[in-house]
Image: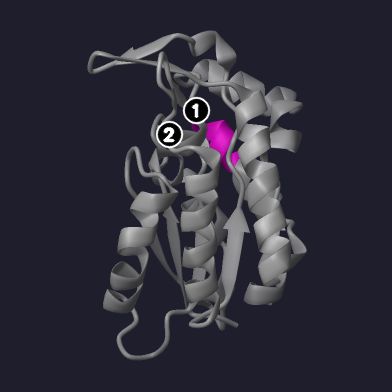
Amino acid sequence: MIDRAGFFGDSLTIGDSDAEGLSWPGRLCRGLVRHGKRSMTVYNLGVNGDTAPDIALRWRREAEARSRGGGLGALVFCFGVNDASVVVGKGPQVPLDRSCAAAEAMMREAKALAPVLWLGPFPVDERINPLVEDGVTWDMRNAAMIEFGRAYSAIARGLGIPFLDLVTPLAADDRYRAALAAGDGLHPAADGYARIAELVGGWSAWRSLVA
């Protein structure tokens, strides 16, 4: 069983709009105990607004800083929503080919160092569109999240890395849609993060790491 895990992602990894402050990594790992003691150290390494190229620049340094010379544990990556989000008048923040190139190089390097899991992007409530932040107008569509997720999944298959599609089940999940409506449309309220943790927790690739 691994004794530490680093979760790399964006604000959806951090848990924006989660009043309980746990996000999905905290909920996923809080029940993991062995011999009556917590058996895993959890590092939430999400950064607001991060894309695949952003994470590729920082993940190894941050993972190694937390290894204490004892190995990196597990590396869990979840990104894509920011990459696929369209800046109105310009196109995706990170074009699909550039996002995939950064992701593939990152995952190839990570796999050589530690067990790796890769989660696809999450759906959004499209009623948030157009979203204006800091003078930039965004358009976020689930069709784009699906497109990026499929491309990531193909890369993961080629590298032999477990990949979990989340946009498909969550987009059709009434509970998650309600949590998005209760949040800000991009980030779900607390129950949405609980639902993500349930899906990841039931994933065979995750279960094999913590068994």
Query: Which residue is at the front of the view, 100 or 195?
Result: 100
Residue at 30%, 86% (x, y): give it: 68
Q: Position of residue 173 (x, y in %)?
A: 74, 28
Using the numbered discs, state the Cα–Cα distance from disc 2 to disc 1 in whole angstroms.
5 Å
- Magenta stretch contains residue 204: no
The residue that label 2 is drawn on is 18
Query: Which residue is at the front of the view, 87 or 8?
Result: 87
Q: Amino acid at mark 1?
A: Ala
- Magenta stretch contains residue 193: yes
Residue at 42%, 87% (x, y): give it: 71
Horizontal arrangement in the rendering, residue 68 relative to residue 75 (left or right): left
Q: Position of residue 42 (x, y in %)?
A: 42, 65
Horizontal arrangement in the rendering, residue 68 relative to residue 20 (left or right): left
If the image is split into quadrants, where does the C terminus sit? Answer: bottom right
Query: Which residue is at the front of the view, 109 or 95?
Result: 95
Instruction: Characterize the local packing of mark 2: few (<14), some (14-19) or many (20 or more) Cα atoms within 10 angstroms.
Output: many
Q: Is residue 14 above or below residue 42?
A: above
Query: Which residue is at the front of the view, 62 or 32?
Result: 62
Secondary structure at numbered mark 1: loop
Question: Do the residues under discs 2 and 1 have CB atoms within 8 angstroms?
Answer: yes
The magenta segment: 188-194
Q: Is residue 92 above or below residue 34?
A: above
Q: Amino acid at mark 2?
A: Asp
Give the overall secondary structure of the magenta segment: helix
Q: Is residue 141 above or below residue 62?
A: above
The residue that label 1 is drawn on is 189
First of labels 2, 1 by sequence position: 2
